[in-house]
Amino acid sequence: MDENIICINHPLITHKITLLRDKNTPTAEFRKIVKEIAMLEGYVALQDATTKMIEIETPIEKTTQPIVPGKKYCFVPILRAGMGMVDGFNELLPTAAVGHIGLYRDEVTHEPHPYYCKLPSNLAEKEVVLLDPMLATGGSAIDAVKTLRKYGAKKIKFVCIIAAPEGVKAFHEANPDIPLYIGALDRQLNENAYICPGLGDAGDRIFGTTNK
Ligand code: PRP
Ligand code: URA
């Protein structure tokens, strides 16, 4: 696989994804686990984070030590389901900006439809981390990246929790320069473009809008 397709394959992440997949996992628990997975994935995705040196004083002496300047980052969830991942990333870098891109997938064509966009005006200066738990056909993530580029983003990463091979291929072909972090790579899409085995509709499960 290309070096920009990173399947994290960590037993703790896999364990938590299994809990998400279980249809009996209730909404509050589901939301909490999405946040935890996001934090674990963030730890991996930000391992090359920019640092800068600052002067501090320990109880013993003055010293110059590295910090990660959070303001250099912008986390961008794709609404709705990406919102579930923001808290996990914010725990890692609380001073990062958060932009929002709203897209919904047409139930029949599976094409993404944009309905909202709010991004920092200085996006070109930021390192952008795009967040969405599900990469199915890839249509939503590809559309979101087009928007980010239109707003000037130059350095982008995409972090998802579950991906289908079809979405990975489409996303990587459209954006070979963007590192794609995947918690679990699933088997395939079904006829409704849902990921199998997947976890169902991520937005519905995070926000409790399903009556199943
Ligand atoms: C889901 C998911 C992704 C998209 C993935 O959102 O959160 O954004 O589908 O599918 P794709 O790769 O085929 O584009 P959905 O459109 O269901 O909206 P929601 O988050 O508001 O439920
Ligand atoms: N969106 C979801 O929420 N789940 C899928 O399996 C596919 C797209």
Image (cartoon, grey):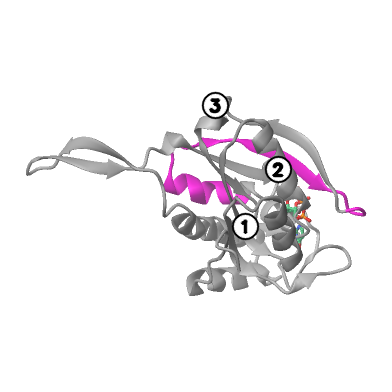
Q: Residue at x 67, y 72 (%)?
A: 22
Distance between the alpha carbons at the discs numbered 2 and 3: 17 Å
Residue 144 numbered mark, or none: 2
Q: Residue type at mark 3? A: Asn
User: Which numbered disc, 2 or 3, marks the residue that appears first in the sequence?
Assistant: 3
Mark 2 lies within 8 Å of ligand 1 (Cβ measured): no
Identify the amino acid type marked 1: Cys
Of 178 and 86, the residue lying toward us? 178
Reading the image, the residue beneath label 1 is 160
Q: Helix, strand, or loop for circle 1?
A: strand
Q: Which residues are magenta?
A: 84-109
Taking the view exactly as shown, the residue that stands out farthest to the left is 60
As drawn, is 38 to the left or to the right of 149? left
Per the image, the residue denoted by label 3 is 122
Q: Quadrant of the N terminus?
A: bottom right
Task: Report the residue that reaches farthest toward the top.
Answer: 121
Q: CA distance from mark 1 to mark 2?
A: 13 Å
